[in-house]
Image (cartoon, rainbow, N blue to C red):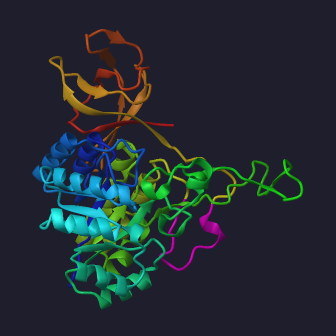
Amino acid sequence: MERHPELLIPASSLEVLKTAVVFGADAVYIGGEAFGLRAKAKNFSLEEMKEGVSFAHKHGVKVYVTANILAHNNDLEGVRNYFEELKTVQPDALIISDPGIFMIAKEVLPDMELHVSTQANNTNYGTYLFWHQMGAKRVVSARELSLKEIKEIRAHIPDDLEIESFIHGAMCISYSGRCLLSNFFTGRDANQGACTHPCRWKYSIVEETRPGEYMPVYENERGTYIFNSKDLCMIEHIPDLIDAGIDSLKIEGRMKTALYVATVARTYRKALDDFKKDPELYAKNMEWYKQEIGKCTYREFTTGFYYGKPDETAQIYDNNTYIKNYTYLGSVSGMDESGRYRIEQRNKFSVGETIEIMKPDGRNIQAIVKEIVDEDGKPMESAPHPKQVLFVDLGTAMEEYDILRRKE
């Protein structure tokens, strides 16, 4: 059976959900204010969830809600109440890792589609068959699987059980995200949604008999970041992902900006559509995809475990900083009576500057900032205050959800 995989995009807020939908997502996954694994993400209130689901459904896009913590006894009652509340939201599926939470979801939301999170360590077809028997519609593969293993899983499971796999974004140095570093150093539990990302910190060695004497582990003069993984990127390998029988191609990033989400969604959307139309067209446009995907912040790229176990080249040893080629300035959210476009400013920009308008259809338009006024119509030379509502004239027509960015 030929599969046309879904493109599944993360959203940290209502604004980002709308961006994901407009820039090419087939489905979006979001977290509520409880029981998801991104406690620091902005996350959605119940009202925002309802608005997001309604917006997505109008555009033919699905919404999945994460409830993927590993629960303790005192979580279970709250989970039950939360699922009761979700009845009013009507998302398309829940993403769950804990069997106890899975059972509560089946009881409280008997008609809800249930997906098993990557946190549940789904590394073999026996596990997939188990979850299928329990009533799961989809299982998210562990990040430690190769494409060969995923293909074997596909061959051993029913056609109606879907496989979802991460294809882009940050990688965790721990097995399926089960990391104790954050808990140990800060008391914040990665498996309860509060990870502080100590894998990105800088480390030295202390020898037991010489306390207080720090010995750097040299890679170069800037020190070493021994746990710092490169980011996953599979834009060049879409034919292999489809051949493996993956149903949903998942982007990591529920903490990311609208610019990141728009860039990744638009690039993978075009790559998937081009490949479906003609594999030669996909091959021909490869340089464009690579150039575009490099315009969002990232930590160098790797193919993770897909082609075998990663070696030393999958880590970044000399720094813990992102590569950042573009800055997010804001997105268009309306117009005033003078024909200027409304944006909520995210980073400073000034009159006379050349910036780029990023459109959902793949075009990037260079424009000069001709005018900036505030909400009272008062002219401004620059936009220094984050989240300030402004109206701008860029000398060209724009549409709602167009994104403004500046090349650094």
Left or right, 68 with reference to 1: right
- Please state the horizontal and vertical placement of residue 94, each as a whole percent of the image: 24, 62
**Image: magenta residue range:** 301-315
- Please state the horizontal and vertical placement of residue 10, each as a whole percent of the image: 33, 53
The answer to whether any part of residue 278 appears in the image is: no
**Residue at position x 31%, y 38% in the image:** 403
- Snapshot quadrant of residue 154: bottom left
Q: Quadrant of the N terminus?
A: bottom left
Label tally = 0
Q: Nearer the viewer, residue 21 or 358?
A: 21
Q: Nearer the viewer, residue 199 or 354?
A: 199
In the picture shown, does residue 233 fall above or below 10?
below
In the picture shown, does residue 249 fall above or below 199?
below
- Please state the horizontal and vertical placement of residue 210, each as a whole percent of the image: 89, 54
The answer to whether any part of residue 289 appears in the image is: yes
Seen as rendered, the residue at the extreme bottom is 156
**Residue at position x 35%, y 81% in the image:** 244
